[in-house]
Image: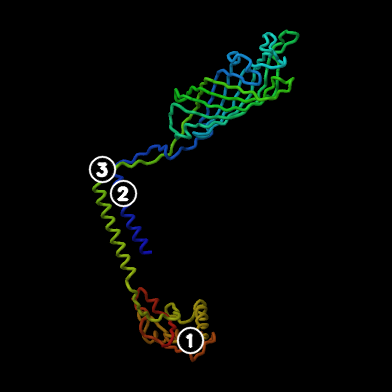
Amino acid sequence: MKKSLILAFACTLLMGNAAFAQTQQETTYVEDPAQGYLMNSFSDNWFITAEGGVGIYFSKFDQHRNVWDRFMPAASIYAGKWFSPIAGMRLGASYFGTKGLSEVDAWARQDEPIVNGYYKQRFNHFGGVGDFMLNLTNWWCGYKPGRIYNATLYAGAGAYITFAKAYSDGESQGYKNAHDGVLAVRAGLINSFRVHPNWQVSLDLRYTAMNNHRDVDSYDCSIGSNVQAFLGVTYLFKKNEWAAPIVPVYPEPENCDALRARLASADARIADLEQQLRDCLNRPATVQEVNDAPLATIYYPINQYRLTRQDARVLKAVSYIMIDNSDKKYVITGYADNYTGTDEYNTRLRHNRANGVKNQLVKYGVSSSQLDATVDNNNLCDLGEKFVSLDRAVTIKEAK
């Protein structure tokens, strides 16, 4: 316990010195990105994106068609949210067209010539999509507000309705629903460039895999691949940055030598206190004799010698001790204060108090031969008139 107090005192000295040094100059508070970032509210970090581009389709027979004749336009619009500087999500509507070849004339372009024995086909796909997004730049390099370039990896899925030109007897019947529920999975990389606190431009490179229903009559259910490139623009709503925790920055002390001197003085003081503690712990213990305390003390109001119920309960407990130690004798001494009353009256009061206690103990079963009732004409405590009530008492002690 003493050691803890001494060490606490020493630590207080050190803290006091350090606090004094720091208060001499102003402490500033800054954001520290090294401590991570603080999560924003749900209404923050929303964005919308619009993009347009081209894509080329790859399926079973498309290698027989000129590659430059297989490009088709594509476009998308999204709304999304970043949940952290690393993870986000977007939902949107997507369109892309595909050109290819088929062995059967289902949905064939009858207004275009056959190529190497294959029928030309052209489809337009409209659907809803969703992507999970991972900002690789913030993940690998740490978040930095206002960063110009970000690389974002995403993966998702969508469902499309497909339209194509229908023909009857060689005449075009306009665009009809060619397939319902064309499913697709996709992944890509967005290269975004910040041109304004609320605006980004981007290059989106995407791969989409979808079930191929071009050759339904020949039951070809292979997977078709679509490779696309988009140029996009993104608007960032409201609060779109992430705040870092605020930390204090303490200035360097102006006088390092003075601080070192105070620390050295504190170290010396700690060493001195630790030595005092060791000396105290190694000091031999001393034995001091203490006078036997009374077994019980009964106090009385002025001019009273009758026992209260509380006094009787105390004496009842004392009687158990005396009965268990029947071979021992006890001295009952009556006292009265010498500051009030006459000597004759006080002597009679002392006897009445001592005999009253003895009679009560005998009543509780203590042998009268164990008890010696006597009086003492001196004050019990003799602490002066202010504490005179402590001199109006009866003490019970074991006889020597």
List the residue tagged with mark 1.
358
Q: CA distance from mark 2 to mark 3?
A: 13 Å
Instruction: Work out whether mark 2 precedes mark 3 in sequence or the reverse, and give the earlier one.
Output: 2
Question: How far across and how far down the image is residue 79, in percent?
Answer: 56, 26
Q: Earlier in the sequence, mark 3 or mark 1?
A: 3
The front one of 361 and 95 is 95
Q: Amino acid at mark 1?
A: Lys
In the rendered structure, which amino acid carries the disc numbered 2?
Answer: Ala
Residue 288 falls in image quadrant: bottom left
**In the rendered image, which residue does mark 2 sit on?**
18
Question: What is the crowding at mark 3: few (fewer than 14 residues within 10 Å), some, or many (at least 20)?
Answer: few
Mark 2–mark 1 CB contact (< 8 Å): no
Measured along the vertical axis of the image, is residue 350 above or below residue 224? below
Task: Say left or right for 255 vs 64.
Answer: left
Residue 254's tag is 3
Q: Position of residue 365 (x, y in %)?
A: 54, 87
For the residue marked with disc 3, what is the amino acid? Glu
| Residue found 66% across the figure and 21% down from its top | 60
In depth, the one of 76 and 47 nearer the eye is: 76
Label 1 Cα crowd, 10 Å radius (few <14 / some 14-19 / many 20+): many
As helix, strand or loop, the secondary structure at mark 2 comes to: helix
Mark closest to the chain's N terminus, 2 or 1? 2
Comparing labels 3 and 1, the label whose residue is closer to the camera: 3
Image quarter (top left, top right, bottom left or bottom right) of the C terminus: bottom left
Residue at the front extreme?
A: 116
